[in-house]
Image: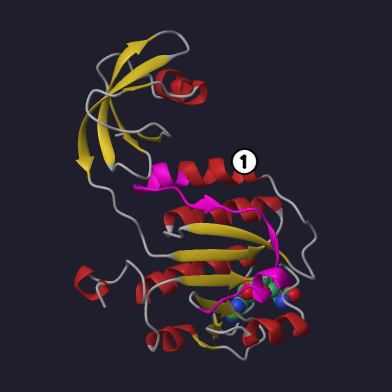
């Protein structure tokens, strides 16, 4: 069943007018018509069963019928990733949606070769990823921030899993095994890695946990995917539900 993220409140008999792009997808690409079912979610009201009730060449109207799944949220996991090349960053955002990151914060570091990115495009990728993966919210794409500013403001309430290709990090499963769940962030550096000064500053923040992702240097997208998968396995929602309360 097709899932669409909408901004409207969702309740019984609520009329929902999809965006022009969503209408094109429903009518033109998926060839839906009046009476066909879709699922809607907005990150607040759970997932609702809805039906196409009006369809013209380019627009349609949906009617929310009943809630099919209650609202849930994944772990409080941020992905902090240096601004890498556009295609790789788009892959990272799509995988962050699938792997359950709640927020993605692009970072400007000494060796990033950009200081801006197309946030709207990344948000659209995050939305499509969330629709496909069946999650009940969409990862928030935050404005790029300078690494120094981020570290200076780091409070320590949120643990920082620092993916350190410098080799001094502990093996990730061992490092996470002794940690508690809760609010975490994963930090991934740029193609050129972190400088020695950056590495020292990162290690100095309260709650920093330097980890190794093995003996080989991974590309930033590979590292982000591996790090999120490992974190979800040890501390996140890939654990059996009875363990997650811990
Ligand atoms: N410094 C490397 C170089 O110049 O080729 C590349 C850095 S790597 C492409 C980008 C980021 O992925 C690193 O800053 C780190 O956060 C993460 N990373 C890659 N391989 C890693 C590993 N084996 N252990 C921990 N983190 C790794």
Which of the image's four quarters has the C terminus? Answer: bottom left
Question: Magenta stretch: residue 153 in it?
Answer: yes
For the record, the magenta segment spans 129-156
Residue 166: x and y in percent read 67, 85
User: How does the figure colour the protein chain or chains?
Assistant: secondary structure
- Mark 1 CB lies closer than 8 A to ligand 1: no
Residue 128: x and y in percent read 47, 41
Residue behind mark 1: 120
| 75 is higher (above) or lower (below) than 209 | above
Residue 10: x and y in percent read 30, 33
Name of the residue lying farthest toward the top: 56
Q: Image quadrant of ligand 1?
A: bottom right
Looking at the image, residue 109 sits to the left or right of residue 234; the answer is right
| 91 is higher (above) or lower (below) than 209 | above
Question: Magenta stretch: residue 57 in it?
Answer: no
| 207 is higher (above) or lower (below) than 16 | below
| 229 is higher (above) or lower (below) than 135 | below
Q: Residue at left 23%, top 47%?
A: 70
Q: Residue at left 60%, top 75%?
A: 154
| Quarter of the view holding residue 217 | bottom right
Q: Residue at left 68%, top 44%?
A: 118
Q: Secondary structure at mark 1?
A: helix
Number of marks in picture: 1
Looking at the image, residue 170 sits to the left or right of residue 192; the answer is left
Judging depth in this view, the residue of 217 and 16 nearest the camera is 16
Q: Residue at left 66%, top 50%?
A: 87
Which of the image's four quarters has the N terminus? Answer: top left
Judging depth in this view, the residue of 32 and 183 nearest the camera is 183
Judging depth in this view, the residue of 93 and 76 nearest the camera is 76
Looking at the image, residue 193 sits to the left or right of residue 66; the answer is right
Looking at the image, residue 70 sits to the left or right of residue 225; the answer is left
């Amino acid at each position: 069943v097709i899932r669409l993220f909408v901004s409207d409140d969702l309740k019984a008999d609520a009329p929902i007018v999809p965006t022009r792009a969503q209408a094109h997808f429903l009518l033109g690409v998926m060839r839906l018509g009046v009476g066909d079912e879709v699922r809607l979610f907005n990150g607040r009201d759970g997932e609702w069963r809805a039906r196409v009730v009006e369809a013209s060449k380019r627009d349609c109207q949906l009617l929310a019928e009943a809630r099919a799944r209650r609202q849930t949220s994944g772990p409080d996991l941020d992905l902090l990733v240096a601004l890498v090349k556009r295609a790789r960053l788009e892959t990272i955002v799509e995988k962050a949606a699938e792997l359950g990151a709640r927020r993605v914060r692009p970072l400007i570091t000494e060796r990033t070769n950009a200081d801006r990115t197309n946030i709207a495009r990344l948000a659209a990728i995050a939305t499509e990823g969330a629709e496909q993966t069946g999650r009940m919210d969409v990862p928030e794409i935050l404005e790029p921030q300078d690494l120094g500013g981020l570290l200076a403001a780091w409070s320590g309430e949120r643990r920082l899993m620092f993916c350190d290709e410098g080799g001094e990090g502990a093996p990730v499963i061992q490092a996470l095994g002794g940690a508690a769940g809760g609010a975490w962030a994963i930090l991934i550096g740029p193609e050129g890695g972190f400088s020695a000064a950056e590495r020292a500053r990162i290690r100095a923040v309260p709650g920093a946990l330097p980890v190794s992702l093995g003996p080989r240097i991974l590309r930033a997208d590979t590292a982000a995917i591996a790090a999120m998968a490992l974190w979800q396995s040890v501390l996140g929602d890939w654990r059996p539900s009875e363990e997650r309360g811990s």
